[in-house]
Image (spheres, grey):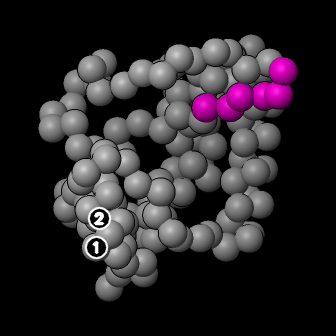
């Protein structure tokens, strides 16, 4: 049973525009835990640019040299989020990657507008 149903308007927006910001919320305690997880990942990876924290869902030193945090794996598997994703791309869902893309005030790298899909080995691009 879906915890969060997208409206037909939201589904249409995704199919027309290629993205969606769903109107769902997490519990305050979940948000607080994610804030702590961001702090833990930043502290554990002080030698890595905060815009380049790749595979942070892996709760150990991963193959990219980043020490992640389980909170991001749990976020990616949150039933509210998965319910929304399933309505857009179907039930065959896999976590391909998870990046913490921090932009600290006064220190963020410039990242020009771009489309990542050209560089991803995933087809179809509706992911």
Secondary structure category for the residue under label 2: helix
**Residue 71 picture location, percent across and down:** 62, 53
Q: Is residue 108 above or below residue 24?
A: above
- Prevailing secondary structure class for the magenta stretch in the rendered image: loop
Res 77 → quadrant: bottom left
**Left or right for 12, reference 108:** left
Q: Give the residue at x 21% y 63%.
A: 91
Q: Give the residue at x 42% y 21%.
A: 114
State how far apart marks 2 and 1 are (Cα). Answer: 5 Å
Q: Nearer the viewer, residue 36 or 108?
A: 108
**Left or right for 30, reference 95:** right
Residue behind mark 1: 8
Q: Where's the N terminus, which quadrant?
A: bottom left
Asked whether 92 falls inside the magenta stretch, the response is no
Q: Where's the C terminus, which quadrant?
A: top left
Other-residue count near label 1 (Cα within 10 Å), few / some / many at <14 / 14–19 / ≥20: few
Secondary structure category for the residue under label 1: helix
**Left or right for 3, reference 74:** left
Q: Is residue 58 above or below residue 63?
A: below
The residue range painted magenta reads: 101-106
**Residue 51 picture location, percent across and down:** 63, 23
**Residue 117 picture location, percent across and down:** 29, 27
Q: Is residue 105 visible?
A: yes
Res 26 → quadrant: bottom right
Q: Give the residue at x 44% y 70%.
A: 79
Residue occupying the far bottom of the picture: 1
Q: Are marks 2 and 1 in contact (CB under 8 Å)?
A: yes
Residue behind mark 2: 11
């Amino acid at each position: 049973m879906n915890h969060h149903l997208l409206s037909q308007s939201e589904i249409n927006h995704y199919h027309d525009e290629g993205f969606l910001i769903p109107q769902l919320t997490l519990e305050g305690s979940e948000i607080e835990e994610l804030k702590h997880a961001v702090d833990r990942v930043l502290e554990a990876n002080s030698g890595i640019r905060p815009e380049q924290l790749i595979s942070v869902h892996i709760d150990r030193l991963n193959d990219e040299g980043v020490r992640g945090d389980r909170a991001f794996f749990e976020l990616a598997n949150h039933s509210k989020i998965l319910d929304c994703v399933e309505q857009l791309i179907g039930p065959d869902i896999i976590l391909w990657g998870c990046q913490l893309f921090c932009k600290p005030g006064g220190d963020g790298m410039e990242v020009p507008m771009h489309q990542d899909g050209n560089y991803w080995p995933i087809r179809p691009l509706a992911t």
